Image: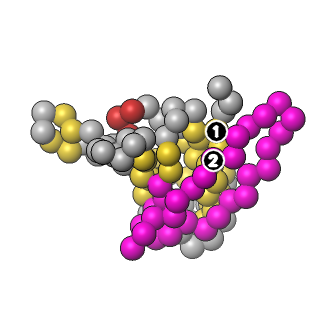
Amino acid sequence: MARTSLVATRLTATGAAPAPVTPDAAGVSFRNTGRCFLMVVNGAAASIDVTPVIGRQVKGQSVTSPPEPVAAGTTAFFGPFDDDYEQPGGKDLMYVNLSAVADVKVALLEMPL
């Protein structure tokens, strides 16, 4: 199953209008610039978990990121993300898993340079 590929909406002094989308059950992917924030809108009746996937290994061992809860009916922001989250050989590619996607929307926001 493919991940939903997100393109960042750049934040500006005059505002930004992100267009949140429903993510795929496999999660989302995006190019990590170090200035990105993932917006997660949980419209579901239950809490969900958001887990950024760490792409690096420590002494040959995979490392997992703890899941972060997003309460029902709330919006949460995650980021910025450092290089540890970039997938091997992925040219700044980052993955984020979600425990549920029904009634959930996501958007990627990026701070300007």
Label 2: which secondary element: loop
The residue range painted magenta reads 1-29
Q: Residue at x 43, y 31 (%)?
A: 82
Q: Residue at x 21, y 39 (%)?
A: 57
| Residue that carries the numbered disc 2 in the rendered image | 8
Q: Residue at x 36, y 47 (%)?
A: 90
Asked whether, in this view, residue 37 is left or right of residue 68, the answer is: right
| Residue 8: % across, % down | 63, 47
The answer to whether the residue labelled 2 contacts the one labelled 1, judged by CB atoms less than 8 Å apart, is yes
Question: Label 2 sits on what residue type?
Answer: Ala
| Residue that carries the numbered disc 1 in the rendered image | 110
| Residue 60: % across, % down | 12, 39
| Residue 91: % across, % down | 39, 43
* Residue 13 covered by magenta stretch: yes
Residue 90 appears in view: yes
Q: Which mark is residue 100?
A: none
